[in-house]
Each structure stands twice: as structure tokens, then as C-alpha cells.
Amino acid sequence: MHNGGVFEHRKQPLLPMESFSRRMVRHVLLSLGLLIAALAAGATGYHLLEGLNWIDAVLNASMLLGGMGPVDLMHTAAGKIFASIFALFSGVFVLAVAGLLFAPVLHRLLHAFHLELDLEPDVKNASDSDRGDGDDGASS
């Protein structure tokens, strides 16, 4: 069933629920891994550039990643530049992780919708041929 991409092609059958659940677990684990890496990078930056202790550095990085903003004021130019870059990164990062988490669900919904659309012409043609009266619907 592997077609070289992450998701199945629209002409392939819908992924069984067990396989879809495994896909969701992979996406959640990847998202958590990215979140931990971003948090570690942010905390390290605050610790090294601003001299915050590790707890305060993690707190500031967490608050920025969560969209709340920093807790401590930055006192050095390097800390202020880092905080502004990390804030911009955090905004884009949240959107990217949301996309990573929602992609399998949205793909499954769209895939099911396409499969349903692909079946509709077949159902219509099957009902026309089931009549078997040889009438094409036009009156003579």
C-alpha cells in the first residue's frame, strides 16, 4: 500500500482504523518530540544568553511557546534579540505542530469524502442498467 508518500492516494481504500490509530500515535509522538526540542532550545538560549537559572529559563520558553509571552524582563541585548527571535519562532512552531497533528484527521475526512464521490457515478450507472428495459430515458 506504500506509494512513496505519507498518506494513501485517493484511489486507494480508506486506511483501517488500527493503522490510522498507529499513524495518529506517530504524529503525536513526533509533535511531542518537536515540542521538547523547541522547549530545550528556548530554555538553553535564555539560560546562556540572559543568565536565567534553568527553572526560570524553562518557564520563559514555555510561556512563549504557549503564546503567553515572557515572564522575566530581558536585561542584555543578546537576551532581547534571542527572545524576539524565539517569540517569532514560537508562533510559527505552534501552527506547524497543529498542522502536523490535524493532517491525518483532515486527510482521512477528505479521503472518505473522495471515496464517496468516486462511488456516486457507479451507483447512478448501476441503477440505470438495473432497469433493463433498454429505455435510455428519452421518449420517442
Image (spheres, grey):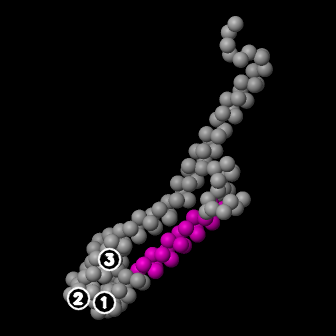
Q: Secondary structure at mark 2?
A: loop
Q: Tell whether position 73 is magenta.
A: no
Give residue 98's position: percent from left, percent from top: 45, 64
Query: In the figure, 73 relative to 6: above or below?
Result: below
User: Outermost residue, top direction?
Assistant: 140
Q: Amino acid at mark 3?
A: Ile
Give residue 44's position: percent from left, percent from top: 38, 88
Check contact, mark 3 vs mark 1: CB within 8 A: no
Q: Amino acid at mark 2?
A: Thr
Query: In the figure, 41 relative to 121: above or below?
Result: below
Which residue is depicted at the point 67% across and 13% down? 138
* Label at residue 76: 2
Q: Which numbered disc, 3 or 1, marks the residue that appears first in the sequence?
A: 1
Q: Which residues are magenta?
A: 19-39
Q: Which residue is tagged 3?
A: 85
Identify the main secondary structure in magenta. Answer: helix
Residue 28 vs residue 78, the one in the foreground: 78
Residue 132 vs residue 9, the one in the foreground: 9
Residue 122 vs residue 78, the one in the foreground: 78
Q: Is residue 131 left or right of residue 31?
A: right
Q: Amino acid at mark 1?
A: Leu
Estimate the spatial distance between the alpha carbons at disc 3 and disc 2, rounded to whole Å.
14 Å
